[in-house]
Amino acid sequence: MRASGDRGHISGAERLVSGDLLQQTVLELAGRAVSKQTRPAEIVLTIEDLGITMPERLKSLELVVADATDVQTARSAAGRFLRKAGVTVAAAEHALGLLSSGPGPSGENMRGAMIIDASSGKRLEPDQSRGIRASRFDWTLPAGIRMRAQLAGQGLGHFRTHEALALATKIAHAPGVIAELCWSDDPDYTAGYVASVRTGYVRFPALKEYGNNKGGRAIFVENGCDVSTLVNYLETEAKLITDTDAESKGER
Ligand code: AMP
């Protein structure tokens, strides 16, 4: 689902479900599109039959809750986690600056993510106003239920955390990806994260001030990464995310 207004992107969401959940999922996504304060001028729901019975599974990144209380401390800590994952100081600072000012060409938010060379900080996505949108991922049904309960138990019951952890898991396992940095463009939602296979999904309660409507996603890739292979993975390869309990419960 994507909803947009006169000033561009408002909201979007991705699901990967079995056919029997189609109607319920369409209603949920349509409800999401009209739930924001800004009324969309256009809502697009795209439904594709992937024809696969069993998409490939990925084990969720581990959730790490960072305790930085103010935005400045959180951004410095996010920069340190990015460096730990293999991103240079220059590339991390460039991305932090772009998310602060709005990553689109005129400072607007993008529909998708930037792709950034983790060494030089150079932007590599073919369209800098649209970005790349990762699609075709979701939790398996039982893992989704368990993760919702686990997150709620940790005081992280917002649907955004649940969705972002699945998205970050798909992105972290992409060919050539080193790390990801994200905070929402929703003015009411200040949380953000750094995610990588090396660090896990490191969640910060506030990577921007309340009321700020600038945000986005930066995907850092290794130098020489084949961008078209990466884009193909992000846009088209179906992945279902399992939690760590799935194997012990014989779900794999
Ligand atoms: P959100 O967390 O939904 O507020 O999204 C924050 C920003 O992340 C959006 O403005 C987009 O730039 C980007 N984004 C959201 N969803 C995706 C996605 N599925 N793939 C890539 N980038 C996304």
Image (spheres, rainbow, N blue to C red):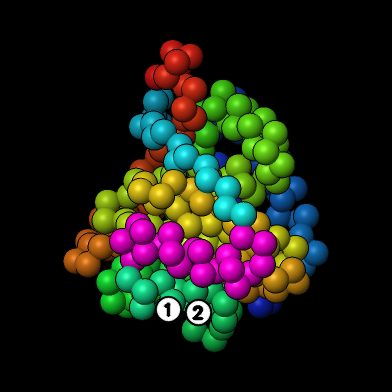
Tell which of 52 and 90 is nearer to you: 90
Could one spot residue 103 in this view of the protein? Answer: no
The kind of residue on which mark 1 rests is: His
Amino acid type indicated by mark 2: Gly
Question: Which residue is rendered at x = 27% and y = 71% of the image?
Answer: 119
Q: In front here: 250 or 15?
A: 250
Is residue 244 found left or right of 205 in the rendered image?
left
Question: Crowding near pointer 2: few (<14 within 10 Å), some, many (20+)?
Answer: few
Q: Which mark is residue 37?
A: none
Q: Which residues are magenta?
A: 68-87
In the rendered image, residue 66 lying in the magenta stretch gets the answer: no
Across and down, in percent, residue 110 comes to 53, 70
For ligand 1, tell me if the residue under mark 2 lies within 8 Å.
no
- Residue toward you, 87 or 252: 87
**165 horizontally vs 180: left or right:** right
Q: Residue at x 50, y 79 (%)?
A: 97
* Quadrant hosting residue 41: bottom right
Name of the residue lying farthest toward the top? 250
Q: Is residue 93 visible?
A: yes
| Closest to the observer, 138 or 59 | 59
What residue do we see at 48% from left, 57% from top?
Answer: 194
Question: Mostly what secondary structure, the magenta segment?
Answer: helix
Q: Quadrant of residue 169?
A: top left
Residue 86: x %, y % from top left: 31, 61
Task: Please tell me the numbered disc located at residue 94.
Answer: 1
Query: x%, y% of residue 224?
Result: 19, 66
Marks 1/2 in contact by CB < 8 Å: the verdict is: yes
In the image: residue 145, left or right of residue 200: right
Q: Which residue is mark 2?
A: 97
